Image (tube, rainbow, N blue to C red):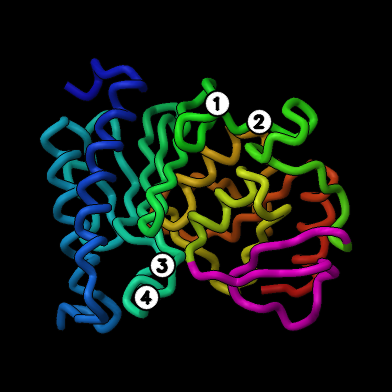
Amino acid sequence: MANDMTNAEILAVLDDAATRVFEVAAQIAGPQMTGVRDDQYAFDVAADEVAREVFLEAGLGVFSEESGPHQAHRDILVVLDPIDGSSNAARGLPWFSTSMCALDGDGMAVSLVKNLVNNKTYRAIRGQGATLNHQPLLPACRQPGSGLGPTDATVLSASLVGITDFPRHHLGWKQYRSMGSSALDLCAVAEGVTDAYIDCTPEGHFTWDYLGAVLISQEAGVALGEVWDRPLVPSDLAEKRNPVAAATAKLLEEALAKRRTVGI
């Protein structure tokens, strides 16, 4: 039963599900739609089905972008985005992922984000750190020059920043990238590929878009916040949030302040 599972065992279940989603993603052959929802691709549904089957058989509940809640009363609930960056996947743009975050009574417990193009896999267990392909992700000050962990950037004017949506005015970064998978965008900060991530959308992101990467980022030592100071794990998982992540606390403070000048 799920309530008897260790976090390591839960992570093994997430790994199994992610492997099956990766197999589905390898068969993507274009933007075939389901016809059920205007914005729903057939491969999204196929990925959801294989992941959901793994979770439910393991005794976990599921809250999925594609199919909603399943056995949500269970002790462990996996917030699932089967394929984050579906439009990229449909058009062959190589930046899309699967994102999973297992929640327990204390919040985010275990998470996994897998890049569905190159199989790079980010994992985290609460209180036990984060890894990329099983190599620890640690802040630059603790692991200098390794390339496996957040940078030591402290000012936006010297930073490479990932964004979703373009704000009404420039926020002061040196360079930016807008790539279309918020899970991977956040993990890029944890890895040290970018220095920060700012959600510039007016409406925010759903929890399935970012929770998996938020735990990974948190465990890697990334500084995290929300534009309007709301909790990133809302009591209603269908609510949206505007996450912001930065390599250092000083950079996060500036990123949040600059993002707030844009308003909603």
Q: Which residue is under mark 1?
A: 129
Q: Residue at x 41, y 67 (%)?
A: 85
- Ranked by sequence position, the earlier of labels 1 and 3 is 3
Kindly state the secondary structure of the residue where label 3 is placed: loop
The reply to whether the magenta stretch includes residue 162 is: yes
Question: Would residue 66 be seen by someone viewing this image from the given angle?
Answer: yes
What residue would you read off at disc 2?
138
Label 2, label 4: how far apart the Cα atoms are:
32 Å
Single out the mark in the foreground, 1 or 2. Answer: 2
Q: Residue flagged by tag 4: what amino acid is it?
A: Gly
- Numbered disc 2: secondary structure: loop
Q: Amino acid at mark 2?
A: Leu
Rounded to the nearest angstrom, the CA distance separating label 3 from label 4 is: 11 Å
Please identify, in this view, whether the residue under mark 3 or under mark 4 is nearer the observer.
4
* Circle 1/circle 3 CB separation < 8 Å: no
Q: Residues within 10 Å of mark 3 (few under 14, many from 20)?
A: many
- Tell me which numbered mark, 1 or 2, is placed earlier along the sequence: 1
Give the position of the C terminus as an image quadrant: bottom right
Q: The magenta stretch spans which residues?
A: 158-180
* In-image side of 38 versus 121 (left or right): left
Q: Badges 3 and 4: C-beta atoms under 8 Å apart?
A: no
**Is residue 142 part of the magenta span, yes or no?**
no
Label 3 belongs to which residue?
A: 85
Kind of residue at disc 1: Gly
Amino acid type, label 3:
Gly
**Where does residue 16 sit, x and y in percent of width and height?**
23, 37
**CB-based contact (under 8 Å), mark 2 and mark 4:** no
The residue that appears at 25% across and 75% down in the rendered structure is 40
Q: Answer above or below: position of 13 versus 99.
A: above
